Image (cartoon, helix red, strand yellow):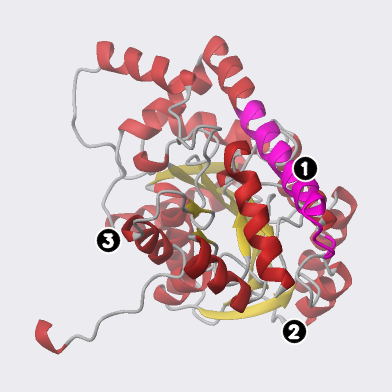
Amino acid sequence: MLERLPPAPADPILGLSEAFARDPRPDKINLSVGVYQDEEGRTPVLECVKRAQRRLLEGEETKSYLAIDGLASFRQLVPRLVLGHIVPVELTATVQTPGGTAALRVAAELIRRHFPDARIWCSEPTWANHPNVFQAAGLEVRYYTYADPTGVMLDFDGLVCSLDRARPGDVVCLHACCHNPTGLDLEPGQWRVLAERLRERSLLPLVDFAYQGFAEGLVEDATGIRELVRAGLEILIASSFSKNFGLYAERVGALTLVAQTSEAVQAAVSQVKAVIRSNYSNPPKHGGAIVATVLADEELTQIWEREVEQMRERIQRMRELFVATLAAKGVTKDFSFLLRQRGMFSYSGLSLAAVERLRTEYGIYIVGSGRINVAGMRTATMDRLCTAIAAVLEN
């Protein structure tokens, strides 16, 4: 049977990283995969994480299984980080998952099992893996308007109008901040308008919160989620701690539910646990324990907040340097829109042909859609990067 299986196509993002690893050119640049890098090109272990790990190593006494829903301290602390104090404790619950992707998959399977007629609506464009995850769970994926045809401006009126095509009971996948791949985010007033439209249409928001702290700040980046909650909506929130804790390899995520009654919360959590049990049974401990250790300690939390701020500010500096260097190279195309985008990613507006030339001729790896990982840029390689883009655009 296995001999009859055809090879699967390469992942559009991770496949590029594999090709990058095989590329022998010493001056190659990888701006495809969504991983933060410092000025030396490293993905660092945060100081708060190192300190938390030392505490765990000294005090850990068992490697036994966690509960189906994960580490208790993690489950108690994450809702406060995401929601603050706007929701009574009894109206929300969190389960720990192996990364934000697993949180999305668990949410999708919950929806498919109990609301089989529900469709899920993703932004156009969206993270390349969103449709894969939702379709694998058996959901029908539809798309709502998000960016304008150029991909560099938010089309909010189109977004709101396109949701009129959704049926009551459908699910809408939203990006809380640092929209992937465009870097275009909603303003607080737009979140309030969107919340009202979701309420009017009886639509359930599933919010992907992968980059908390990378747009404006840890609290500011939760504005959209909190506006949805204030509007009285039920909500599912998939959090990732890969980026803001640098815990990519530890696979730390969470699925948080907000409902209108404590009975609804408990019933929903029981069904979420049933989904988890038939998938991966229970989550890994180490990464969740790191996050919980940091969030439970005031000193470590302060160190973490400073480190998130430093990462956010470095990304913004790279945006500014990229735009300025392109202009200095004589590029006539206006790239100033990148300064209005936020987070790790930007839609560059580069064509597929330009992206392919950058890879084959210059060893610069960018996703075919033109999405650039700004967090992978470095001051030391910025001149070469912009020189190559200038050459490709000139021709």
Nearer to us of marks 2 and 3 is: 2
The region drawn magenta spans 308-334
Q: Quadrant of residue 182?
A: bottom right
Q: Which residue is mark 1?
A: 320
- Residue 12, compared with residue 8, is above or below; it is above
| Residue drawn at the location 62% of the way across and 63% of the way down | 371
Q: CA distance from mark 2 to mark 3?
A: 33 Å
Question: For mark 3, does the 10 Å Cα neighbourhood hold few (<14), some (14 to 19), or many (20 or more) residues?
Answer: few
Farthest bottom residue in view: 4
Kind of residue indicated by mark 3: Ser
Q: Which residue is mark 3?
A: 278
- Name which of mark 3 and mark 1 comes first in the sequence: 3
Horizontal placement of 157 versus 315: left or right?
right
Q: Give 322 or 294, whichever is nearer the viewer.
A: 322
Secondary structure of the residue carrying tag 2 is: helix
Asked whether residue 180 is in view, the answer is no
Kind of residue indicated by mark 1: Glu
Residue contact between numbered discs 2 and 1, judged by CB atoms under 8 Å: no
| Residue drawn at the location 48% of the way across and 69% of the way down | 360
| Residue drawn at the location 83% of the way across and 72% of the way down | 160
Q: Main secondary structure of the magenta part?
A: helix
Residue contact between numbered discs 2 and 3, judged by CB atoms under 8 Å: no
- Residue 256, compared with residue 88, is above or below; it is below
Label of residue 165 in the image: 2
Secondary structure of the residue carrying tag 1 is: helix
| Residue drawn at the location 51% of the way across and 14% of the way down | 297
Where the N terminus falls, by quadrant? Answer: bottom left
